[in-house]
Structures are given as structure tokens and as C-alpha cells.
Amino acid sequence: MDSVFVEQLKRSRYLVTLLMVLNALVLALTAGGETSMGLKLLAGLALVVSLVLFMMLRNRSMSRAVTQANEPLLAVDPNTGIATEHWYRHMLALECRRAVREFSPLTVMRISLGDKVKREHLLQLIRVLSEELSRPGDLIGWDGEHEIGAVLPATNEHAGALAQRCYEQILEHTDIQQSDLWLVSQTFQPRGSLNLARVLEYLGNRMQNEQEPGVYYEAEHVTSPDDNMMYSEG
């Protein structure tokens, strides 16, 4: 609430300035000793106007704070039509839980076009991915400021071929150069350690460690020392 109040005051700087001037006038008049009836009336009027302005600003700021608190977070980016970063990661966390519960592998992709990405290239990339990843449950969204992510539930051993095909389709049907395209993908087995933090850490490290652009895919082994099926938060 306080931060919204301060923001509202900044936006209403002219009213705030007037409020301060009126208060200063009141102080000057009351400090002057004997005053005429007209000045007393003016001082009283200034106090009333100051109080009214203050209440107006307070009510506007509080109304704005309540409105913001009740507004749902956007699930879809209106500029691109894909999931916002918040919603994408929220759904990725849910799919991690679902994968463990239903004992089903989960594949996650992260695609980067570098730091100097162009908007038209992003739109082309999103269009191609939307055509390739069209199963019910597949989700494409922002996975950072310049990176696109994809969540692919219930995947199998063909996920590596899918990642390669997406990479090739992007190069063939967009203006993106091969030297600007990184695609990392991992198929996670439904173990208890599967959670949002682990997926983001793995993909982030993999993207950072791959110096050369290209497509990089790995799949966890079905058997592992960490085969605890109890889901762990992260």
C-alpha cells in the first residue's frame, strides 16, 4: 500500500505542490500574531482545502492499491501470444509435480538468440515453435528476458529428435542465423528431485556453458541412485 501511495503522490505532483504551498501559507498567517477576520477566514479555508486535497490523494492511492492487489497476473503476453515468464514458470512447477505423480518423463527446452535479439526474429521463432509443439499440454513462454522456453509433458525417447527438428525448422523458416541460435533441451525422469529450481538451474548452466551455438539435448537415465518418488519442493 505505501509504495502505491508514494507512486500516486508523484503522479499528482502539482496537487502535492499546491498542498504544500497552502500549508506554508497557513503557518505564515498563524505565526503573524494578530490578524484580520479576512486573513483568519483565508487560513481556515486553506486548511479545509489542504485537508480535502490530502484525502483525495489518499483515497486515490488506496483505491489504486486495492485494484492492483485484486488484478490477476497475466498468463499470456499480449505482444507475442505466449505465456508470460511468471505463468510459464508457474506451469513448469505444476508439470514437475504432475510428472512425478503420473510417473511420466518431462522434457523442457530453452532457446536463446543472444543478447542482441531482434523482435522480428522472436516473432518468427514463436510462430515456428507453435507449429511444431502443438500437442495438448505443450506450453511455450518466456523463460527470461531474451529466452523462450517450452514445456513438453509425457515425452519419450523421441524428444531428442523433436529438439533437432525444431532447431532445423527454425533455421529453415526464419531469418535467424545459425550463429545466433542456441537450443538446449533435457528430458527429466519423474524422480523426487524433479522440481522447478532444479530444471531452471540445469538449463541455465547448460546454456551458459555452451560456447558455440547449436542444438544440445540430453536425457536422464531411467535408473538412478536418486529414484525417490517423493516430490521435493524447490
Image (tube, grey):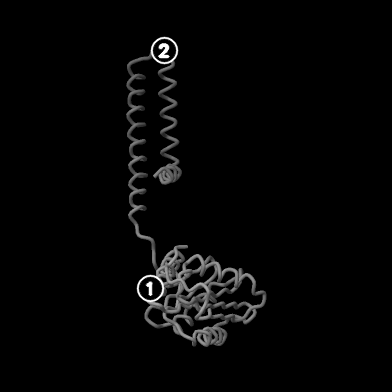
- Kind of residue at disc 1: Arg
Residue 186's place in the image compared with 55, above or below, is: below
In percent of the image, x 55 and y 83: which residue is there? 167
Q: Which residue is mark 1?
A: 101
Please name whichever residue, 224 or 56, is drawn nearer the observer in this view of the structure. Answer: 224
| Helix, strand or loop under label 2 | loop
Q: Which residue is mark 2?
A: 33
In percent of the image, x 57 and y 78: which residue is there? 183
Q: Residues within 10 Å of mark 1 (few under 14, many from 20)?
A: some
**C-alpha gap between disc 2 and disc 1:** 80 Å
Q: Quarter of the image holding residue 147?
A: bottom right
Please name whichever residue, 135 or 234, is drawn nearer the observer in this view of the structure. Answer: 234
Q: Looking at the rendering, in which quadrant would you find the N terminus?
A: top left
Residue 173's place in the image compared with 30, above or below, is: below
Locate residue 72, reporting x and y percent. Answer: 35, 60
| Helix, strand or loop under label 1 | helix
Please name whichever residue, 181 or 217, is drawn nearer the observer in this view of the structure. Answer: 217
Residue 233, can we see it? yes
In percent of the image, x 44 and y 42: which residue is there? 6
Locate residue 67, reporting x and y percent. Answer: 33, 52
- Kind of residue at disc 2: Gly
